[in-house]
Amino acid sequence: MSRTLVAATRRVLGSRRRGDRAAASPPAGAGDAALVADLVEAIGSDRVRADTASRYLASRDASIYREGNAGPVCYPGSTSDVVACVQVAARHGRAVSPRGAGTGLAGGAAPLGQPVVLAMTRMDKLLGVDLDNGVAWVQPGMVNLDLSRALAPHGVHYAPDPSSQAACTIGGNVANNSGGPHCLAYGVTSAHVVAVEVVLSDGSVVTLGDLTAEPAGYDLRGAFVGSEGMCGIATAVAVRLTRNPPAVRTMLLCFDDVSDAAATVSAIIAAGIVPAAIEMMDQRCVTAVEDFAQAGYPKDAAAVLLVEVDGPAGGVAIASEKVAGIARRNQAISVRTAADEDERARLWKGRKSAFGAVANVMPDYYLHDTVVPRTRLVEVLERIYEIVDRYDLIVLNVFHAGDGNLHPILAYDSRVPGTDERVHAAGREIIEMSLDMGGALTGEHGIGVEKREHMNRMFSAVDLDQQSRLRASFDPHCRMNPGKVLPSAHSCSDIGALRAADAAGVWG
């Protein structure tokens, strides 16, 4: 189990010990007995759980949202199992909530209203590799890092690499259109998913997209990727394969001032250089990471940039020299290039251990995921520090600096009275500030429940209505992960109201 997942599990169990409102799911209601019996008949008793412990564990993800409430939990092993579970849920008038590894950070995998939870982790196989077409078919429960490890003998990999890649699944990545450090050059999940086999809310199976270069018709694949489980359940994913680069250089740039590091990021891009990754951490984050992972980061630096360039050896050498020159012109106090693969792995281990390292600082954390224009990074960081200081909190900043995807981590101890309220208030201000700066609500973690009611700040009522209609075209009965993403005025989480609208022809 990854240290990040361990930290998240500690937070869940800690909240249970503290007796918060969602400390345990209530026992299944009388109506669940028939539902559970039908689910057992459909997929077998070894794949259905309705006990309190199983439902509790399926009621939370790695976010701070604590109000999830799962119904029976199913562990399908095939597309036909998923179809059977969806059909049983439909007969009983119950919604369905798909679930991957539960590493989501916005409440997207926290089920609302005791739906049937489909935990997809047993569908974890690499189904086939087509090197000629550069595509692999994979089941949604396969762990992201396991996929690239399985592909390594072929000289290819799956490019999107979330920090939780040692635990998160491909299905969860598809649901949230996940990113990662190397998505600066290679693009997020939507750029690497060619087609998806999907079970819809009526139990029918469709394939969205295909393997041709220019598929005809609407891009339904693109509409599905990032839909957070509201449009259907992915049961197989065709992913694009990326050739391993012939040469890679990983550089650690250290600065005495955060603004110099941010200025370096803009200068690198302005120079026409698009590295595979540009990651930034401030001093508090660097200190926590170094104490946690011993990655070789200098704890006296105010900020560090982890920059990686890849490609043909000659081009990599030229680009890395240019990056080093830009850093020095922006007052870098040191420029270091990893001497070998072992040092490179240590540097990346440090970056990807950032969230787990917070456990050594405080027992709880709230991680943000807004996006701001890269040219306003310095201003945004100053505002974040001001907001956090005003609420007497601790922040560790780590983010995908190349594309302005912020990940300020508010570290706190929820056992201290009043702390949760201060954390939520600071979080709201950070979100609102990011939007005021011309940014967006999420870069890769999704909207889920956390940022659902902020959607009105970013989209007009007409925009939200169209999003709701698009969702309803996939799921007119509102059975799939209801209550997520769309704010309450545009959500179909009230199944009865949606059915009435459907019967009246509201959705055409």
Image (tube, rainbow, N blue to C red):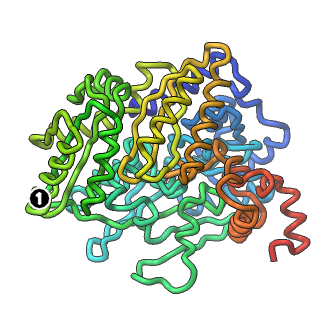
* Residue 394 on image: x %, y %: 49, 23
Q: Quadrant of residue 332?
A: top left
In this image, 181 relative to 245: left or right? right
State whether residue 6 is above or below residue 375. Answer: above
* Residue 98 on image: x %, y %: 61, 51
Q: Quadrant of residue 339?
A: top left
Give the total number of marks visible in the rendering. Answer: 1
Q: Which residue: 66% across, 70% down? A: 204
Q: Which residue: 36% across, 67% down? A: 240
* Residue 327 on image: x %, y %: 21, 44
Q: Closer to the camera, 30 or 465?
A: 465
Q: What residue is pinned by disc 1?
A: 318
* Residue 475 on image: x %, y %: 71, 65
Other residues around mark 1 within 10 Å, as few (<14) / some (14–19) / many (≥20): few
State whether residue 387 is above or below residue 201. Answer: above
In the rendered image, is residue 41 in sight? no
Q: Which residue: 85% across, 38% down? A: 30
Q: Amino acid at mark 1?
A: Ile
Q: Closer to the camera, 13 or 448?
A: 448
In this image, 303 relative to 504: left or right? left
